[in-house]
């Protein structure tokens, strides 16, 4: 198929894009710049839930509790209240994190959990809730399905309180963060319906640079620490024309992506300062988690060949 340069927009996307590197100190804690920037971008996507995954000790819980509220406060311009819920505490009855039974006068009542009450209260108040839901891979496949209404990417997102015959909507500004260690002892896999609803961010094991900062007080990279929140790359506002859209879809069809996944990819292409890195990570992480078969797609080909060539084609869009 041949393509004509779009008259609507010029994407200015090249295969030589350089994503941010190094470490940054935010409110006394050190973070990889790349993760700070990526989370900052994803938190701009309306209703988008985020899954942080990686081995123990990489800092998933710390990022969720300390860093994300800072970024949310910048983006939303409101007070942020954390609520941490460890599903490992509810393995025997996962519904308890939404509502729990209370026996009064020989009568069983179901009471909304504090997490549900906080989200309900935020609807009429000027604060947002950062909902942190840990150990999602420790619960069964059926139990994970209870998280699907909470992670919807539209206005229907809600805590479904089936036993009480009602639901509590989760407002657009509130955030849902899921955490898991996919390779930990005793964990199970996360089902595809849940993975399809979230933006997936890999939190790797501590790097040499991070360990140097913790134990020696000095970064291995002398540029570390010169970057701060003022250096966050702003969200872009690109338009993607008809021919560019056709080329993107044609190239992504072999991956058998869902509509939700296409929506996330197009958001990055339109708004991320680093769209090439986001597309590479999007595909590679889903291969790691089994959402995309790696029989036909080698990771090295995606990162070094497929994605750069697609971006070069998007930039040129010329008929020979």
Image (spheres, grey):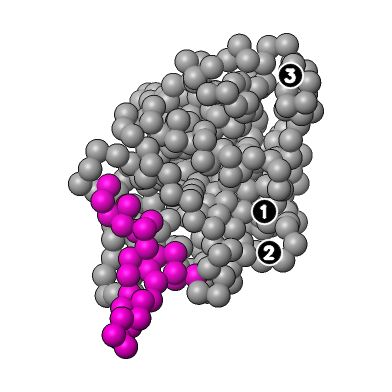
**Residue 150 point in image, percent of width and height:** 40, 58
- Residue at horizontal 45%, vertical 30%? 70
Which callout, 1 or 2, points at the residue further toward the start of the chain? 1
Which callout, 3 or 1, points at the residue further toward the start of the chain? 1
Q: Distance between the residues labelled 1 and 2?
A: 8 Å
**Residue 318 point in image, percent of width and height:** 52, 25
Camera-side residue of 312 and 101: 101
Q: Distance between the residues labelled 3 and 1?
A: 28 Å
Q: Does the magenta stretch include residue 101?
A: yes
Residues rendered magenta in the picture: 94-122
Camera-side residue of 229 and 244: 229
Of badges 3 and 1, the one in the foreground is: 3
Q: On the rendered structure, is 230 left or right of 52?
A: left
- Residue at horizontal 28%, vertical 61%? 168
Q: What element carries label 1?
A: loop
Residue under pointer 2: 187
> From where the camera sits, is residue 65 visible?
yes
Q: What element carries label 3?
A: loop
Local crowd size for mark 1, using a 10 Å CA cut-off: few (<14), some (14–19), many (≥20): many
Circle on res. 217: 3
- Residue at horizontal 63%, vertical 26%? 30
- Residue at horizontal 67%, vertical 37%? 306
Of badges 2 and 3, the one in the foreground is: 3
Give the vertical position of 18 relative to 189 (above or below): above
Tell me the quadrant of the picture where the N terminus can be found. top right
Circle on res. 280: none
Q: What element carries label 2?
A: loop
Which residue ends up furthest to the bottom in the rendered image?
A: 106
**Residue 78 point in image, percent of width and height:** 31, 32
Circle on res. 181: 1
């Amino acid at each position: 198929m041949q393509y004509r340069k779009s008259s609507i927009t010029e994407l200015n996307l090249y295969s030589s894009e350089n994503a941010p590197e190094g470490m940054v100190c935010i409110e006394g804690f050190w973070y990889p710049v790349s993760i700070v920037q990526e989370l900052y971008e994803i938190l701009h996507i309306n209703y988008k839930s985020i899954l942080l995954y990686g081995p123990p000790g990489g800092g998933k819980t710390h990022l969720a509790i300390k860093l994300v509220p800072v970024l949310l406060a910048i983006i939303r311009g409101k007070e942020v209240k954390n609520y941490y819920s460890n599903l490992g505490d509810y393995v025997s009855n996962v519904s308890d994190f939404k509502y729990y039974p209370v026996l009064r006068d020989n009568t069983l009542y179901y009471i909304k959990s504090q997490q549900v009450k906080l989200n309900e209260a935020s609807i009429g108040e000027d604060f947002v809730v950062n909902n942190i839901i840990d150990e999602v891979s420790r619960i069964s496949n059926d139990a994970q399905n209870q998280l699907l209404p909470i992670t919807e990417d539209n206005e229907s997102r809600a805590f479904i309180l089936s036993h009480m015959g009602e639901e509590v909507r989760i407002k657009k500004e509130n955030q849902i963060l899921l955490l898991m260690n996919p390779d930990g002892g005793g964990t199970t896999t996360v089902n595809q319906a849940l993975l399809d609803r979230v933006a997936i961010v890999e939190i790797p094991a501590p790097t040499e640079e991070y360990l140097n900062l913790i134990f020696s007080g000095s970064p291995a990279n002398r540029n570390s620490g010169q970057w701060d929140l003022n250096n966050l790359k702003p969200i872009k506002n690109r338009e993607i024309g008809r021919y560019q859209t056709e080329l993107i879809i044609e190239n992504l069809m072999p991956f058998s992506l869902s509509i939700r996944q296409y929506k996330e990819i197009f958001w990055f292409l339109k708004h991320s300062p680093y769209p090439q890195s986001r597309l590479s990570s999007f595909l590679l992480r889903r291969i790691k988690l089994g959402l995309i078969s790696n029989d036909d797609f080698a990771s090295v080909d995606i990162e070094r060949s497929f994605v750069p060539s697609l971006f070069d084609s998007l930039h040129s869009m010329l008929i020979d």
